[in-house]
């Protein structure tokens, strides 16, 4: 038997865990703005990154947002657009 050497195929899409970015959460009033809770701990996060988290003020950790929200295939029933600040 001959041994074939495995070489990676960089043209194929990467499979496995993907990070979800629920776009509708970007301007939701319930997104995390400065920190999120993980049990009793407060983990700092920026306002720019808080909407990317799988949990929010409506779905606190260890719960997570519904799959259709995380995959951008459905709308969140709790979504409320944050009011724009006047300059």
Image: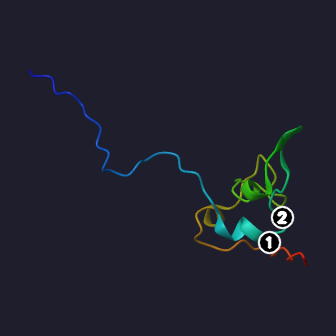
Q: Which residue is outermost to the left? A: 1
Q: Please say if 1 is above or below 55.
A: above
Callout 1 crowding tier (Cα within 10 Å): few <14, some 14–19, many ≥20: few
The residue shown at (78%, 73%) is: 79
Q: Position of residue 25 (x, y in %)?
A: 72, 66
Q: Earlier in the sequence, mark 1 or mark 2?
A: 2
Q: Using the image, tell me which numbered label, if any, was put on residue 30.
A: 2
The CA span between labels 1 and 2 is 8 Å
In the rendered structure, are the residues bearing label 1 and label 2 in contact, judged by CB atoms less than 8 Å apart? yes
Q: How is the image coloured?
A: rainbow
Q: Which residue is mark 1?
A: 78
The image quarter in which residue 38 lies: top right
Which quadrant, please, contains the N terminus? top left
Q: Secondary structure at mark 2?
A: loop
Q: Using the image, tell me which numbered label, if any, was put on residue 13.
A: none
Which quadrant, please, contains the C terminus? bottom right
Q: Position of residue 12 (x, y in %)?
A: 32, 50
The residue shown at (58%, 51%) is: 19
61 or 35: which is nearer to us?
35
The image quarter in which residue 58 lies: bottom right
Q: Please say if 46 is above or below 23.
A: above
Q: Which residue is outermost to the front? A: 87
Side of 19 where 75 appears, left or right: right
Q: Secondary structure at mark 1?
A: loop
In this rendering, which labeled residue sits more in front, label 1 or label 2? 2
Q: Position of residue 9 (x, y in %)?
A: 28, 43
């Amino acid at each position: 038997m001959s041994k074939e050497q495995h070489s990676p195929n960089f043209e194929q899409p990467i499979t496995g865990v993907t990070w979800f970015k629920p776009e509708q959460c970007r301007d939701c009033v319930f997104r995390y703005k400065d920190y999120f809770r993980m049990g009793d701990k407060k983990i700092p996060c920026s306002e720019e990154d808080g909407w990317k988290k799988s949990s929010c003020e409506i779905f606190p950790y260890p719960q997570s947002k519904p799959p259709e929200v995380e995959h951008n295939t459905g709308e969140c029933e709790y979504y409320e657009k944050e009011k724009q600040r006047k300059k």
